[in-house]
Image: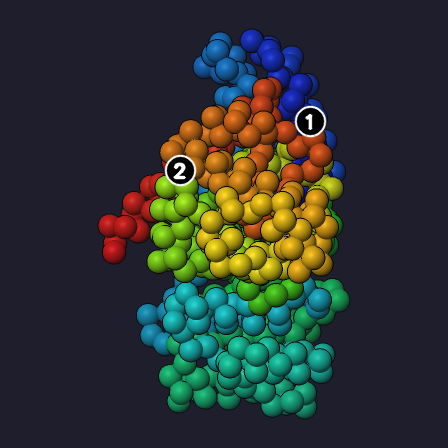
Amino acid sequence: MAFEGLTERLQQAMKKLRGKGKVSESDVKEMMREIRLALLEADVALPVVKEFISNVRERAVGAEVLETLNPTQQIVKIVDEELTKILGSEVAQLQKSPKIPTVIMMVGLQGAGKTTFAGKLSKYLMKEKNARPLMIAADVYRPAAVEQLKTLGEQLNVSVFEKGVNESPVEIVLQGLELAHERKNDYVLIDTAGRLHIDEALMDELQQIKILANPTEILLVVDAMTGQDAVNVAQSFHDQLGITGVIITKLDGDTRGGAALSIRSVTGAPIKFIGTGEKLTDLEIFHPDRMSSRILGMGDMLTLIEKAEKEFDEKKTLEITEKMRENTFDFNDFIDQLDQVTNMGPMEDLLKMIPGMSQAPGMDQLKVDPKDIARKRAMVLSMTPEERENPDVLSPSRRRRIAAGSGNAVIDVNKMIKGFNESKKAMQMMMNGDMNKMFQGMGGMPNIPGMPSMPQGGGNPFGGGLKGKVGELAMKSMMKKAQKQFKKKKKKR
């Protein structure tokens, strides 16, 4: 995630308050100086940094904070709340037209990822809204854009209206809209042209398309890797077109990511989606509170849960949950989980969504080799049906046979079985709601089925000090939110 450098700097700044029974105004001032530098180095716009620092300092030096028993926790809470406020406070939903089609016009500089986002949004609308979108290829200046959109359309089974590169973009949009009305498409996504920089000709063309199409949404696609320029680009497009939302792409890249913290404050336009990878499924609704938690290293359990909900079969998940509670989880369940967890995304990213995990020593260097997952799968597939259902029968001779059958060493098989048994105990404790007992009993962070082992010295992310308090608070907070969310869903059903 693009905010890893910022996360580390913010944690370092707040760590200085650790262990202090009382926090003075000078302590807060020193911490705010560090946070200010961290935000500026992450490419957050100066006006945004000033406002943020002013708001946090004003709240942090109040008597209700400085005189409490846990001032550090209070300050972390204030930083979280003010960061969430900058990011937009509430989720900005995609608007829908009262009459079909809802027209969504995508704008941005060349290379920002407009065409790819058109494909991702089409997939999202089909899956989440049961929609029948039509994509219009209106970028005639980059021939590859038309072909790219056609390829995406074929992959998704979505119609793409195009007239090559010799027709005017305005005429292409006009004919595409006529076709959408004929076919009764409920969404139309217009992929417009970009430039390497903003110019008058580009804006004139986009304004003509806006007048013709009367879009419900004008979404600006911004590349997170452009840093401060992203804010200037956003302001220019907003001034001339009146954008209704922002999409930030390439947030998975090695970038400082401060643009995401600035755009909402500078333009007033909400961030609606973020792109987190190259796959068509790598699109997330932007949740300001969850992003703040990620930036502060407090994890994002709700997004992790939602990813799981999308990939995991509901009936099977309920069965597995019951097995976890009864401690009858076996290797057949392990394989099912392994396959579904793999579909949720890179393991290291999933682990960092667990509160406190991003702060575990060695986590920043953790890279999961897909071959390791394949090896574990091969070990389980080398077991007999009896061994998968009843791991207790795995004697030394059986383990040697499994090692030979899967092309692994016996020590690797032993390690995998040990991790599986530890995770079973941990999951049973978690299902019973005893998080402290879980970590104490496992001597640190346990293995989770489908997840890699923790780095050497990983230890318990809920251990002492500021890290532990932040992780524990975040876990409790996230779990409460998750429970409320699931109760709402249950009532709807």
Residue most extreme to the front:
397
Whichever of labels 1 and 2 marks the residue nearer the N terminus, that label is 1
Residue 136 can be seen, yes or no: no
> Residue 99 or 483: which is nearer the viewer?
483
- The label number, if any, that marks residue 160 in the structure image: none
Whether the residues at callouts 1 and 2 have beta carbons within 8 Å, the answer is no
> Residue 7 or 348: which is nearer the viewer?
348
> Residue 378 or 6: which is nearer the viewer?
378
Q: Residue at x 67, y 54 (%)?
A: 403
Type of amino acid at the residue the image marks with label 2: Met
Q: Residue at x 71, y 54 (%)?
A: 408
Residue 480 x %, y %: 38, 36
448 left or right of 407 in image: left
Query: In terms of image quadrants, where is residue 46?
Result: top right
Q: Secondary structure at mark 1?
A: helix
268 left or right of 31 in image: left
Please tell me whether residue 369 is drawn above or below residue 62 in the rendered image: below
Query: In terms of image quadrants, where is residue 8?
Result: top right
- Label 2, residues with CA under 10 Å away: few <14, some 14-19, many ≥20: some
Query: In terms of image quadrants, where is residue 150?
Result: bottom right
Residue 23 x %, y %: 58, 12
Q: Which residue is mark 2?
A: 431
Q: CA distance from mark 1 to mark 2?
A: 33 Å
Please tell me whether residue 347 is drawn above or below residue 136 in the rendered image: above
Q: Secondary structure at mark 2?
A: helix
91 left or right of 80 in image: left
Residue 15 x %, y %: 65, 22
Quarter containing the C terminus: bottom left
Q: Residue at x 60, y 11 (%)?
A: 20
- The label number, if any, that marks residue 12 in the structure image: 1
- Label 1, residues with CA under 10 Å away: few <14, some 14-19, many ≥20: some
Type of amino acid at the residue the image marks with label 1: Gln
